[in-house]
Image (cartoon, helix red, strand yellow):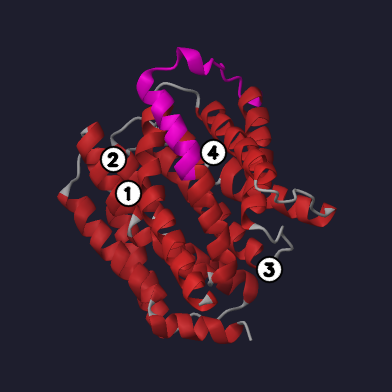
Amino acid sequence: MAKSSNSALVILAFFAIYVIWGSTYLLNKIAVLELEPFMLASCRFTTAGLCIFLLAKIMGIPLTITKKQLLNTIIAGILFLSFGNGVVVWALRYVDSGFAALEISSQPLIILLLMRVLQGKKIQPMSVIGVIFGIVGIYLLVSQKQVIAQEDSIIGMVMIFFCMLSWAYGSLFVAKADLPTNYFVNTGYQMFTAGLILALMSLGFGEKWSSPLVWSGEVQISMVLLVIFGSILAFTSFNYLLKAVSPEKVATSTYVNPIVALLLGWYFLDEQITLQSVIAATILLTGVYFINTKKTLAIFERFKR
């Protein structure tokens, strides 16, 4: 019975990081067109962290953690949220939400290469094929004239790449780090501390802060959805999965995220979906498939023994 419950929890958690996270590109894009990016991310994560602490208190979940766990949650929060997400929000000012999601879909490739460089994991033949497909797909994606012609789009693309590096390293870090055993508490500390760091980043860059009362209705709704679903629910699911399954399995969310983001961006924001983008997405996600095929995953599991 317990095994069945755990399986159901894993499935629900994957749904959260697959579909809900795919929609956050649209929500962030809507909000960042009106708000300062680091202020936006800071408000989102600080609010989400405080909500989690409040809910934990109501449910009787202890918030006490060790100094080592606090330090590790701060590091994870910086890698995933302060830099890994905050800079993506900033980059959305210069690239379409669907494009950002497609570029980030190469995340498994980055994780694979980092595992090779940092942990000495051998890249298997199936994964090599995936890497080749991934590189070709990324090239087709970023070489489009429509994309390059947009003002500061190259800066946006480059910064998203560094965010991917940060997320990839964070995924490897938390898989082995001493973190709070309760995934809800773990998420709360990561979000609250990341939100404070983002506030410092916002002040450092001289961003102008505004009251939520003067935000447009669309932005207010987007922020509520980002806090409740994109932050509390999806990120808690993400932290749970990083401990329950391997990092490269968690990275398979990049199969679905770009499709959800592309369709939502096209429907709500009239973002263009070019034929080259469709071809690039097909090749890129095929590469992700080869990287994450069961044969490859079985080999990765042997390294952990």
Residue located at (65% from left, 23% from top): 203
Quick one: label 4 or label 3, which is nearer the N terminus?
4
The residue at which mark 1 appears reads as: 142
Label 3 crowd (10 A; few <14 / some 14-19 / many >=20) = few
Instruction: Based on the picture, tell me whether residue 60 belongs to the magenta stretch.
Output: no
Instruction: Give the amino acid type for the residue marked by disc 2 in the picture.
Output: Val
- Mark 2 touching mark 3, by CB under 8 A? no
Residue located at (34% from left, 61% from top): 255
Q: Nearer the viewer, residue 237 or 142?
A: 237
Disc 1 is placed on an element classified as helix
User: In which quadrant is the C terminus drawn?
Assistant: bottom right
The residue at which mark 4 appears reads as: 86
The residue at which mark 2 appears reads as: 147
Prevailing secondary structure of the magenta residues:
helix
Quick one: label 1 or label 4, which is nearer the N terminus?
4
Instruction: Give the amino acid type for the residue marked by disc 4 in the picture.
Output: Gly
- Mark 2 touching mark 1, by CB under 8 A? yes
Residue located at (62% from left, 57% from top): 183
Taking 16 as reference, is 91 above or below it?
above
Q: Which residues are magenta?
A: 204-230
Quick one: label 2 or label 3, which is nearer the N terminus?
2
Q: Which mark is residue 176?
A: 3
- Mark 4 touching mark 3, by CB under 8 A? no
Instruction: Give the amino acid type for the residue marked by disc 3 in the picture.
Output: Lys
Of the residues tagged 2 and 3, which is closer to the observer?
Answer: 3
Q: Which mark is residue 178?
A: none
Quadrant of residue 68 in the image?
bottom right
Label 2 to label 1, Cα distance in Å?
7 Å
